Image (cartoon, rainbow, N blue to C red):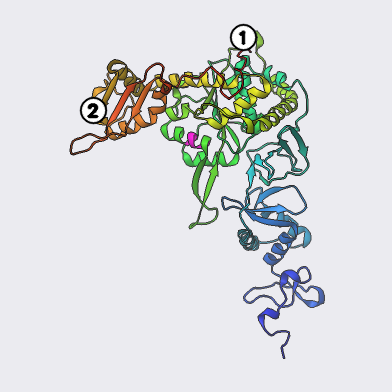
């Protein structure tokens, strides 16, 4: 015959007993003093916190291995368990309210968080989005960043504002709320009045802004180029604050890849301001952020586990000289020139901020209109030739179909100019171009190429390859840009001697060769007329 103090599985679960009480304290745990109903002792604080948390939240694990809590009766927002905005602080406050005169200790909160992390890890990974996401039906969802969790749901042909997001979002301290979009037919005109761009450039900007909310395609980095006095920094700040508002829309160049990954993890869209030179590591990092990056980092509060941060970001930069762009990065940018602002047209920061605040709801509504039309048209777009940023090119083609513009043709033409500017800023690339121009075809090893290229000036440039291995790597990286000016690179052959060295074959492509990468000026999709190139 069993007794009350018999087998372990006969003991009641503290979570399922009367709130705050338990018949018997767990072995090795001081349950504290003070009686509850019927003279029972209070459950340990950690157990009461866990009980309280399970009544108020559900717990999920994200696809990158981070645990989150989601309020059962609240917005669809994933709260981190720890940190300044985490659920830990909320539970500490709720505990103090529920048990007057008692405050949860740090050790009790830590123990409770460990249990809640284990609960989250028992669930299947759940996508947790930042600012933008895809709903199950394919609609684009944009988080307004408000405390009530409202979101804009953009479907093919229409958009609406919902009180509760259909996808799970996380927030960060680098985010700011955006106003609710309004339907106003003058939204694009109001936005154009704030930036000193000609009409073709502005239309490309509109297409880029609308595409920035499509979460699952690569987005070219927007480069605002112009001399001093063109308002590049303020314009870029406004563009970022349209699609992903932030208290720090403009950022300085990160010191290293780890600093960059921290910035990228907290914002969907970022702007690097006043870029003059881009070191190779940053150029590679930005390229990966455009197409999709992954960073392995130490898991929080552990020494023996890691998490993989995977992200694709929307980037903007301001610069005076496009020559700062390296080869790979130059192929992943949308370059827009800003016009000089005349002295009588200048406005103060306060005036610009006020005008932007007034125009922003209508501009957001206009961008939602453009994106809704693009989503409806995009499944029917088939390009005859695919440029490097193929997904973005298809978006431009859809914009042109629905708006009657010529953004794709302008983008391809501008991309060719960017490639030329990037080559002019690279002495090694220009030396190769001159060598092939004179020889027509050149063949040899990387070491022989270094011997054949004259070093420009009395001092070797800092980025000039120091040995054959580095020279071979540079030629491979420069191949797309060289191809854009008609220089074909072939590194698939090997020498016939016993060393079997890899050969570089550099050839001047004929003027009518498609490898010269001259942008097509005819129709870029079947059964469609050439778009009107007029502003």
Which percent across, then down, holds residue 446? 27, 30
- Name the magenta segment's main secondary structure: helix
* Of the two numbered discs 1 and 2 in the rendering, the one whose residue sits closer to the viewer: 2
Seen from the viewer's position, the closer of residues 497 and 471 is 497
Mark 1 to mark 2 CA distance (whole Å)? 53 Å
**Residue located at (75% from left, 25% from top):** 362
**Residue located at (69% from left, 32% from top):** 376
Q: Secondary structure at mark 2?
A: helix
Q: What span is in magenta?
A: 285-289
Quarter of the image for the N terminus: give it: bottom right
Which percent across, then down, holds residue 128? 63, 47
Q: Which residue is mark 2?
A: 448
Kindly identify which numbered label has been placed on residue 342.
1
Q: Secondary structure at mark 1?
A: loop
In the picture shown, does residue 258 fall above or below 242? below
In the picture shown, does residue 381 fall above or below 113? above
Q: Can residue 321 be seen by looking at this rendering? A: no
Which percent across, then down, holds residue 193? 69, 16
**Residue located at (43% from left, 35% from top):** 281
Is residue 501 part of the magenta span, yes or no? no
Seen from the viewer's position, the closer of residues 238 and 365 is 365
In the picture shown, does residue 145 fall above or below 519? below
**Residue located at (40% from left, 24% from top):** 483
In the picture shown, does residue 256 fall above or below 452? below
């Amino acid at each position: 015959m069993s007794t009350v103090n018999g087998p372990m599985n006969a003991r009641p679960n503290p979570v399922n007993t009367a709130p705050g009480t338990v018949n018997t304290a767990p072995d090795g745990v001081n349950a504290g003093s003070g009686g509850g109903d019927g003279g029972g002792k209070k459950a340990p604080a950690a157990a009461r916190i866990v009980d309280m948390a399970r009544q108020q939240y559900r717990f999920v694990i994200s696809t990158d291995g981070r645990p989150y809590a989601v309020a059962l009766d609240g917005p669809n927002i994933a709260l981190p368990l720890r940190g300044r905005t985490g659920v830990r602080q909320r539970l500490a406050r709720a505990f103090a309210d529920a048990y007057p005169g008692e405050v949860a200790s740090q050790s009790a909160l830590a123990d409770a968080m460990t249990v809640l992390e284990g609960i989250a890890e028992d669930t299947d990974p759940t996508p947790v989005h930042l600012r933008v996401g895809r709903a199950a039906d394919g609609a684009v969802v944009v988080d307004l960043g408000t405390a009530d969790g409202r979101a804009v749901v953009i479907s093919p042909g229409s958009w609406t504002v919902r009180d509760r997001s259909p996808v799970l979002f996380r927030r960060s301290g680098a985010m700011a709320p955006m106003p609710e979009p309004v339907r106003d037919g003058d939204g694009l005109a109001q936005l154009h009045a704030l930036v000193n761009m000609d009409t073709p450039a502005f239309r490309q900007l509109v297409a880029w802004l609308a595409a920035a909310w499509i979460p699952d395609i690569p987005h070219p980095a927007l480069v605002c180029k112009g001399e001093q006095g063109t308002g590049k920094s303020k314009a870029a700040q406004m563009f970022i604050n349209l699609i992903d508002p932030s208290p720090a829309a403009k950022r300085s160049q990160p010191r290293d890849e780890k600093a960059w990954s921290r910035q990228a993890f907290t914002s969907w869209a970022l702007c690097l301001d006043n870029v003059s030179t881009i070191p190779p590591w940053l150029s590679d990092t930005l390229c990966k952020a455009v197409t999709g990056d992954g960073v392995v980092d130490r898991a929080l509060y552990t020494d023996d586990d890691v998490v993989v941060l995977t992200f694709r970001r929307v980037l903007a930069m301001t610069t005076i000289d496009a020559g700062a762009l390296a080869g790979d990065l130059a192929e992943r940018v949308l370059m827009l020139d800003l016009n000089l602002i005349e002295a009588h047209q200048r406005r103060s920061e306060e005036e610009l901020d006020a005008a932007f605040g007034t125009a922003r709801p209508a501009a957001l509504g206009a961008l939602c209109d453009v994106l809704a039309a693009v989503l409806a048209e995009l499944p029917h777009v088939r390009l005859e030739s695919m440029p490097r940023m193929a997904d973005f090119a298809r978006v431009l083609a859809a914009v042109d179909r629905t708006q009657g513009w010529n953004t794709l043709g302008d983008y391809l033409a501008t991309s060719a100019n960017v490639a030329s500017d990037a080559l002019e800023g690279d002495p090694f690339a220009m030396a190769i171009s001159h060598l092939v121009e004179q020889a027509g075809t050149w063949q040899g090893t990387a070491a022989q190429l270094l011997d054949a290229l004259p070093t420009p000036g009395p001092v070797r440039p800092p980025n000039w390859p120091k040995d054959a291995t580095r020279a071979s790597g540079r030629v491979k990286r420069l191949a797309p840009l060289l191809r854009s000016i008609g220089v074909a690179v072939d590194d698939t052959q090997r020498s016939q001697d016993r060393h079997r060295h890899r050969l570089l074959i550099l050839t001047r492509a004929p003027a009518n060769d498609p490898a010269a990468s001259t942008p097509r000026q005819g129709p870029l999709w079947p059964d469609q007329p050439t778009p009107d190139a007029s502003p």
